[in-house]
Amino acid sequence: MSTTTHETRIDVDPDVPLVRITREFDAPPAKVFRAHTDPELVARWLGPRGLEMSIDHYDCRTGGSYRYVHRRGDEEYGFHGSFHEVRPDELIVQTFTFEGEPDGVALEKLVLEDLGDGRTRLTSTSLVDSFAARDAFVASGMEVGVREGYERLDEVLAQG
């Protein structure tokens, strides 16, 4: 089965410490939303290739929370946060904390836009507390994880 990979745009805002990620998918918003909210699907695509993911809990609803760990050999990277607003097929607002930097909390907003013809545009923003934190986030290699993760999401969506 072949999948189409679209460009993943990652932009930094010059005025606020924000990273904006924009990506189109060849799937309707309901499928893209489900891939972000169903823990079994999330574990199949989130993050770069070569990392194993285990989910401690993933309650994607307004007021819910999550925690997961990515592993490669003896290395472990934990992440957690809270879901502040979840609207089916259109919006997820959450916090995001990398446990290696426990004081750094990002406020993330994911918006799904129906482009018609079974296609969706995802726009994700991550707002952090300083330009230094934003620049460190971007310099951390997150770009590789985001791009590979969305390529993996294309594969999950193509499988139905």
Image (cartoon, rainbow, N blue to C red):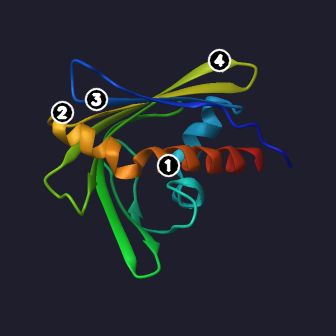
Q: Residue drawn 21% across and 37% down? A: 128
Distance CA(mark 2)–CA(mark 4): 33 Å
What whole-number distance in Å separates the C-alpha atoms at marks 2 and 3? Answer: 8 Å
| Circle 2 crowding by C-alpha within 10 Å: few under 14, some 14–19, many from 20 | some
Q: Earlier in the sequence, mark 1 or mark 2?
A: 2
Residue located beneath label 2 in the image? 131
Amino acid at circle 4: Leu
In primary-sequence order, the first of circles 3 and 1 is: 3
Which residue position holds label 4?
115
Name the residue: 50% across, 34% down: 88
Secondary structure beneath label 1: helix
Q: Considering only order in the chain, which callout, 3 or 2, is on the residue closer to the N terminus?
A: 3
Q: Quadrant of residue 109?
A: top left
Q: Earlier in the sequence, mark 2 or mark 4?
A: 4
User: Mark 3 is on which residue type?
Assistant: Leu
Would you name the residue on which mark 1 appears? 144
Q: CA distance from mark 4 to mark 3?
A: 25 Å
Name the residue rendered at 39%, 45% in the picture: 61
- Please tell me in which quadrant of the rendered image residue 133 appears: top left
Disc number for residue 18: 3
- Classify mark 4: helix, strand or loop: strand
